[in-house]
Image (spheres, rainbow, N blue to C red):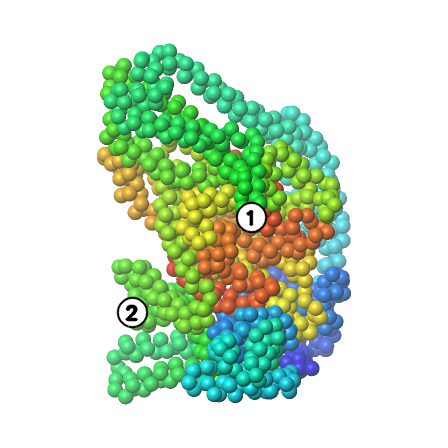
Amino acid sequence: MSTAAIVLTVWCAVSMAAVGLSLYFLFQKAGQKGWYALVPLYNSYITDRVTVSRAPMTGAILGIFCGLLSLLMPGWLASQFTDKGRLILSLIPFGACMLVTSAIVCANMAEVFGKPDLFGVGMFFLPFVFWPLLAFDKSAYVTEQPAGDIGEDFKALGADIREGGKMVGQGLTGQEYAGTGSFQRAGNRLGMALHNIPFWFRSFGRGFTTDGYAQLDFLKLSPGCKRFYKLGRAIRSIPFHLWNLIRKIGNFFKKIGVGIGHFFVDLVHTFITGDWKTKVSYVIMGFGSCARGQWLRGILFFVFQTVFNIYLFTFGWWHVKMLPTLGTIQRVTENGQIVVAGHNSFFILLYGVLTLFFIVAFLYTWYQNIKQNRISEEILRSGHTLKSARDDMAALADEQFHKTLLALPSLGVFVFTILPIFFMILIAFTNFDHAHQPPSSLFTWVGTDNFGELTSLKGTTSGPSMGGTFRQVLLWTLIWAVFATFLNYFLGMLVAIMINKKGIRLKKVWRTILVMTIAIPQFVSLLYVSKMFAADGLINTTLQNWGWISGPLPFWTDKHWARVAIILINVWIGIPYLMLIATGILMNIPADLYESARIDGANGFQMYRKITLPYMLFVTGPYLLTSFTGNINNFNVIFLLSGGEPSSATELAGNAGGTDLLITWLYKMTVNNHDYNQAAVIGILVFVVTAVINLIVYNMIPSVKNEEDFQ
Amino acid sequence: MSEYEIREIMQTADAADTYAKDGSEKPVFRHSKKRHERRTLTGLHLVLVIMSIVWLVPFFFLICQSGRSFVLEGGGMVNYVMPRQGFSLDNYKGLFIKNFNVQNYMGTSLKIEDFTQSVAETDIFSEAEQAKVAVIRDYWENHSRKDRLKTTDKLSDQMKKDFDAGKLSAEQAEAYQAVFTGEEGRAFMKRVYSGILDEHFTRDFRSDFLPWWGVTFLIALSAAALFTLCLYLLRLLLRARDITGPAKWFSVLGIALAVFFAFLIAVFAFKGFSIPNVEMLVRTVMALLLLVFFGFVAASAFLKEDSRLLRSIPGYPAQGPGTEIKRILAFFGEMALLFVILVCMLVPLKSSNFVAWYGNTLTIALFVAVIQTVIVLSVSYALSRIRFKGRKLLMNIVLVLGMFPGFLTMIVLYFLLKQVGLTQSGAVPGLILIYCASSGMGYYISKGFFDTIPKSLDESARIDGATRLQVFMKIIMPLAKPIVIYTILMAFMAPWGDFVFASYVAFQSEPNYNVAVGLYQWIKQNDKQNYFTLFCAGGVLVAVPITALFLALQKYYVEGVTGGAVKG
């Protein structure tokens, strides 16, 4: 055995002897019989009584329980460890229990014998010094009330249990309820619940009907009944909500239709009622504005028209024409020389789409031109003057300031987001994959084949089906998003509450330490941690050196281990963010809410449930939603940690791995396989999933609906 | 009621707690609330300590491993940081020799003495081979003084020249061909290198990592304590009027001795680890100093503003106007010093592409910080203040667009940018363009902030005749300092960690990667040597400025993230 182990054993043996001996004398000082200290479980019980706390007995029982529990270690865990490792692993919970219990006992003992707290700390770290000191010095047993007789306590406990049994049938309320022991209360609650069950079903049924309860009747219901009633109502209202949604969509299309109708009516009307300048403007844009003195606007319109015409007739029209076929002439190469320069499907699609957008933009501008004319006519008719160029420029800084501010960003968003997304949606309907790469080969429209392939369940000859893979990846994505968001959220909130608690010292230290984790760039932490858990990384080699495991733990090679590891590591990364947010928000909750609750007798957990939690959920509702959709697309964490591994060609098609999200699968398809059409399909499906979730949640979260309730 | 009566009532109220609710006089035991709370608090403190350790442990190892690069002495690889495959000697050695790519090292700066010595001493070479090497050595001795042939590559070049010119004897020619050319030569050199490695592995490799870090940590802690103490003493010294003459000089001497001892502790601790050369010692000490400085700087983040420790630092402003700016500057000064130490420590990085990557990312970050801030603030102001037609539509469109995965746009943009030449060698401007162009979509937080500024300010200014532009620049912007700083911070920090876009735009063009992609390449190469400690060093160099920036501007980050709910 190594020196450390020997030292540790000797230390433990000596401490236990010292503590045992001291307990003998301490029990005597406290008025109990000394030999009680030597009986294993009973001495914990007596320590309970002596130190006026429930901890020692609970701790001893819990420790034994943990020790027994380790016999139930699951096979998949046990198989990874050597015998030595398994032994130590099973001792860990037991050891932790014992450690905590002994700390509590030391602290309490010190207090009960009138020593300062630091003495208790000494008792914990150097037992063989301080326990005998306590036992043999002149300290006396000081406590608020003496330890009573055990016999009486047992009798009281027995009576409580008996009464509890009787209570099941009784259903006490109010004053009688408050005056009973804990078992009695439990029995009472059980009885009430059993009694209420038929009422719950009835409320559910009532909720399901059209009229339900009147307001006053509803308030009279018990909490359980209220819940079931609300459930019934919610289920009943589902068709109503669906219908609403359909109606909204219908309205949307109706509005579009009406808009188009108005558009045409407007055009014709303006043409008929306008003067000659307006009529000319239908053909030459900007003519009307120029003729009326608005030179700047007129010239801008005319230039735009010219540019558009030039573009369309030299370049754009051909591309639009080729859109339905996406190119017909294939490139032919002989001996590396291009013999026939074929069509490039990609650019046909790209410029074709661009031209289509241009056409739409042109139509819109043309329409604006017409409207301008009409408005100018009306202004002139009513006797005012038109705005000059200088007025226009000045307006850009004032009433039309939003145009100045939004012009460049909108252009950027259009070119770099809208256009590509639209383009990719179109790609999803082509066969642009690794076999059809322009410019050397053409690709063409295939309709919804890609979607069909992705949702099919048939396996191909080369492996599993794409549809099955897609389902698995989607499922894991959703599970991951749920865990990543909510686990982080609640744990982060817990940590924030913990740090915020009155009495915790060095608050800023704890917060700064956690905040430093945020400050360090995420990819550095992720890459390093991924190496730490690797088969040859820090954790595995350390455990191997200690002899706990014989082969490396399969953190990144086994699917389930990888998933759990990723979720836990994400918790490690995410808690500081949530802690920051939660701290900021918690500090804003008015303190008098808590005070009044405490006066009313609420304990910590109730205050959390009724005050803290609703407030947090209200304020961070939208954040949770954003965070959820962000986690669905959380590329960095998954890719840098596990690279989407472990991949298995027999289970998952298309290079997907066990921890792949939809988005990392997309990345792999794009970068490794060059299957752009499938990537596009997945992208669209991600959008659909995200949109559906957003829609559902937006209509449900209270911050949208019940603002008044909350206030 | 008199105070006495009130106090009595309160005491009976407390005592009432301990009596049974059924009215009987028997006292029922309840824990005293104070003790219960105290126990909870102790428990919570313990939990917090454990949490802090868990959170900091990986970074601690990161820093330690960046300072501990594995260097081979005499193998001519002093500037090359070796991989750290595992922590067992055999594992490491086996993997290294297996993956050893002679092409990289063929004839590079292997000193002739080491070359011949290795062949002579390791017993994997046959007599015939050793004879050949002896021949080569003779040849070398005849040339070395004149032609300065110190390393094998120069030697082989010279021999090649002579061989082509026919000046070599038959024996020498044969030796040359066997050792320096062709497949045979490559295999031979590989065995030479393996031999060297074999010998030096046994001597230099340390497989027990844990005692090393434990000692390091203790040393760092004690060094930090000593350092703090020195500063405190210095301050006392500078302020004390009644310490004069010899006493003062003794104090100064004491401080100097303390610093010296701190350094000595560091040196002694590593004596037992047989560091092969001074460079590694220096680098390890630098790692320690890094820990000390880091700890100190982090400490200054949480110390009270007028704490004695802070005031004891000469030049550190504690009060007065402009203190915040001064403090931030002092912070950055410390960080600059730290950075210099780091750079000295991480010299081997200069031989790789890391500097290029760093420069790229820094450029991108600076440009993006400015441009993105301007764009985001414009957009959020417009959407927040000005109720124009189509505003709701625009917000909804942006919302819907945001639901598409961002990477989707990358595929198209890559082709587009390629036409214009903004990919691969033009990756830096290309990336700047990509980040800035769509940044308008991230207006949400800024808009929330602008919403909290009362509209009456706007309106009163407009009544007084200001244009919207003037209102924006002169009234709103000064009020929006927190959100401006938050936006700049976020915009600056984003390019450092962006992997997806950067890896795609700079596809396989190494000098144009950003740090994230570069470090990823280092750590994920499976068929070449994994440059693990190199990654650690690079990671530290990236992390330190960003962390410093973040810690200094932490207040604004919290404000931004909580949506202005917490101001200041």
Q: Which mark is residue A336?
A: 1
Kindly tell me whether residue A536 is visible in this rendering: yes
Left or right? Give the position of A343 relative to B247: right
* Rendered residue at 33%/17% (across/down): A280
Toward the front, the furthest residue is: B166
Left or right? Give the position of B219 relative to A136: left
**Nearest to the observer: residue B354 or residue A336:** A336
- Cα–Cα span, label 1 and label 2: 71 Å
Kindly tell me whether residue A386 is visible in this rendering: no
* Rendered residue at 46%/85% (across/down): B143
Q: Which mark is residue B315?
A: 2
Chain at numbered mark 1: A
Q: Which mark is residue A425?
A: none
Q: Amino acid at mark 2?
A: Gly
Chain at numbered mark 2: B
**Badge 1: how crowded within 10 Å, few (<14), some, or many (20+)?**
few
